[in-house]
Amino acid sequence: MTADLNANSVPPATPGAVGHIRLTSHSGGSDALPIRWGAPTAAERGPVVGTTSRRAHRNVIGTHSGSYSVYRALAVAAGALSREHRADLTDTAPTDVVGPYPQWSEPGAIVSLDPWGAMTAEAFGTELAAGHDIRPTIAITKAHVVVPEIADAIANGRLHPDGRYLLPSGAASVTKAAIEPVWHLPSVAQRFGCTEAELRRVLFEETGGMYPELVTRSDLEVFLPPIGGQTVYIFGSAGDLADPEVELTARVHDECNGSDVFGSDICTCRPYLTHAIEECIRGAQRGGVGLVAYSRKEGRALGEVTKFLVYNARKRQVGGDTADQYFARTECVAGVQDMRFQELMPDVLHWLGVRKIHRLVSMSNMKYDAITGSGIEVGERVNIPEYLVPEDAQVEIDAKMAAGYFTPGPVPDAAELGKAKGRGLDG
Amino acid sequence: MTADLNANSVPPATPGAVGHIRLTSHSGGSDALPIRWGAPTAAERGPVVGTTSRRAHRNVIGTHSGSYSVYRALAVAAGALSREHRADLTDTAPTDVVGPYPQWSEPGAIVSLDPWGAMTAEAFGTELAAGHDIRPTIAITKAHVVVPEIADAIANGRLHPDGRYLLPSGAASVTKAAIEPVWHLPSVAQRFGCTEAELRRVLFEETGGMYPELVTRSDLEVFLPPIGGQTVYIFGSAGDLADPEVELTARVHDECNGSDVFGSDICTCRPYLTHAIEECIRGAQRGGVGLVAYSRKEGRALGEVTKFLVYNARKRQVGGDTADQYFARTECVAGVQDMRFQELMPDVLHWLGVRKIHRLVSMSNMKYDAITGSGIEVGERVNIPEYLVPEDAQVEIDAKMAAGYFTPGPVPDAAELGKAKGRGLDG
């Protein structure tokens, strides 16, 4: 197969044919509904159809559930799941209304998620009735979250239960939403300053050949990539997020399993996250609203194997674990310092209708630049309090401040950055 | 494209050609090293080569870093990463030796990870010197983990710092390893009781057409799927895991971001995990060794959108959130009760040389059956203490006990299972 592969020379797959492997490359048919990305109403936009059971209805590359489509396939292989299963969505509708907001149809404001993804039943009732397998790519529910650091904040008198946002049990009452990635390829390319053809080509080639449709089906503009999505936690009323008059405290947090779950002391991820939750609760109690957007981008989206390799290199290098070599060690192993690409991150804020963040709980200049660059106003920037920085994480904090991360205090100088503040591997 | 697609009618891609999109479907060449899965030595087994820069050297389907290959592609699209970047692995070698163990070459013992994945430099030095881009799929490092629940256990006198496994600061000293999935397709098919051709076909079709090589390249038997991997945390000496005389306390834990990170009270995931960490530390202090294996299988590998949809359906159904409808609600939405497939889970234990788990910190019969079925002896099973079960999570625990999960106490009867113990959505 090369780029010269001629679509017309290949017969279309027969949907439902038994005994033939059905590939989607050239099976787009008249039964597929069009997607007009960024259209102002759901009816004009049309549904995202990533079903695997009715090939002729598909109007995207890839399928639902991100990476978990691989497990879905295992379920079919094991005989546990029928290929024809259609989700029974009774009682699953969102607990809270989000949008529609003007940003949903502002050109280029949202390129990596489907703003209509939570309201499939109401927005696409006609198409569902006509037999299209339209699945939510967003789900919204309620939860009580119990975080030990919040219990500590209560015990230390920093937080006080109010019975609404923070319960006497110590649990915080939240609305939360899970969001799967839905990429509009022409708009994603625009964000990264390359052509759509270049984006499609590298997505195909650099993944070792995932989804040939990326290069053979330019008519399919929407891609459901097999990557992790996001979760947002809202402290207070979801509707208030879109009101710039209501004080919004927000953190956009990138996954770090080693710290977020296991509390590794080499970084500030969990301390920063729980600090943000504390700030969000306090903000809601003041009459504001709080937001934590959590993205599945482990180890700066390099994955955990690369992250651990870098840890070893940092701890073993001549001179010890110093801030001035912090980014260099990642770049040696991974070729870049960071792969998180905050360019796509503000989409979730636009989905929620956010116009202004009064208090951004983050020191990252990359996040700040991406948010303000997308047209959202940022008031105050809230850094992590000194007492929450683990000793071994001082290397990271120093390196980040020197690289342009926000700090209200002094930026460490060269002498400071050259000090081995990190523990060795035998510590 | 259909199954009739004739490989011979398609010209092979020219490796390194400029201006042509290079697909891997038929580019396997004489430069690719063979993989003999399960061979007793690294030299006989041969390296796993998933590079995207030297196509002719590839001997697998897919590429490294699981899902994060998509971000790698974005980095190239954005002009931030050179396609030719080769990782500089100086100082990244494992901090601890794991294996080789006899299980590494026992037929069918390990099918979903590369046991030689951490020791690429020493095992494949010749091939590296010859220019093959061989990357680690496993990385091993040291860490100090600070878990608030462990601090509580110290404060409550349940745990005592010893200065070695549990430090006076409250941090636990661990060895940890990150592991990317590496699937040997013929062996994975065997685990699931289907033919290799069936497995390849559904992996391709049910993902919406990911990696045509799955069906066109039967000569490539190894697949690097774009899914999350695993992380293992070892409390005590890694080498002791393989000694059945040393008491092993172990938990195999499946990711649940809502509880593991945010402490949602609808399930027991984080409480069970921190309980296991406490048991592991205590076990190490007794002269044993502890192990937590953490798998990225969010929401029973259904993903978080499906999970939140199910939460809403449970909370809204007539009769309220009851244990007797717990599994039914998941099945309505997802078509199955569970997609985690514990069949692959024991691989990581065999990589670590485990022969006997003295104390398995889990109530899951699926995990127990998979572990014992793979030839590992299990002594005691340790359930979660009653005081750690959040009120809203009683529905889950009741449902699981009724379905066959281990419990040393009484199994709830029909009347008990019909009680609405879960909170509503307005709670």
Image: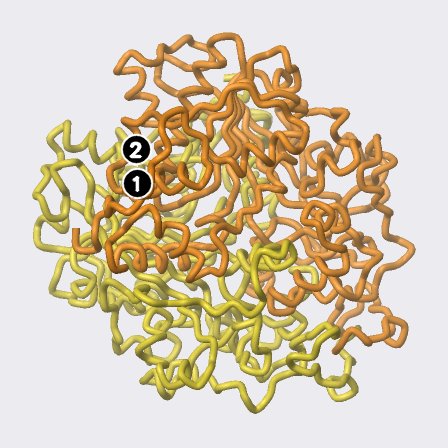
Chain colours: A orange, B yellow
Res B271 label: none
Q: Provide residue B217's location: percent of width, then percent of height.
A: 63, 80
- Which residue corresponds to the image point at 29% horizontal and 69% vertical from the top-left? B375
In space, the residues marked 1 and 2 are separated at their CA atoms by: 6 Å
Q: Is residue B301 above or below residue A20?
A: above
Judge left or right: residue B72 versus residue B254.
Answer: right
**Badge 2: chain ID:** A
Asked whether the residues under the numbered discs 1 and 2 touch, taking CB atoms below 8 Å apart as contact, a structural biologist would say: yes
Res A389 label: 2
Choose between A247 and B157: the one closer to the eye. A247
* Quadrant position of the N terminus of chain B in the picture: bottom right
Residue pointed to by mark 1: A393
Task: Check if mark 1 and mark 2 are on a common chain.
Answer: yes
Q: Is residue A265 visible?
A: no
Choose between A74 and B61: the one closer to the eye. B61
Q: Residue furthest front?
A: A414
User: Tag 2, which secondary structure?
Assistant: loop
Check disc 1: other Cα within 10 Å, few if <14, some if 14-19, many if 20+.
many
- Given the image, on which type of amino acid does mark 1 rest? Ala
**Badge 1: chain ID:** A
Q: Is residue B28 above or below residue B340?
A: below
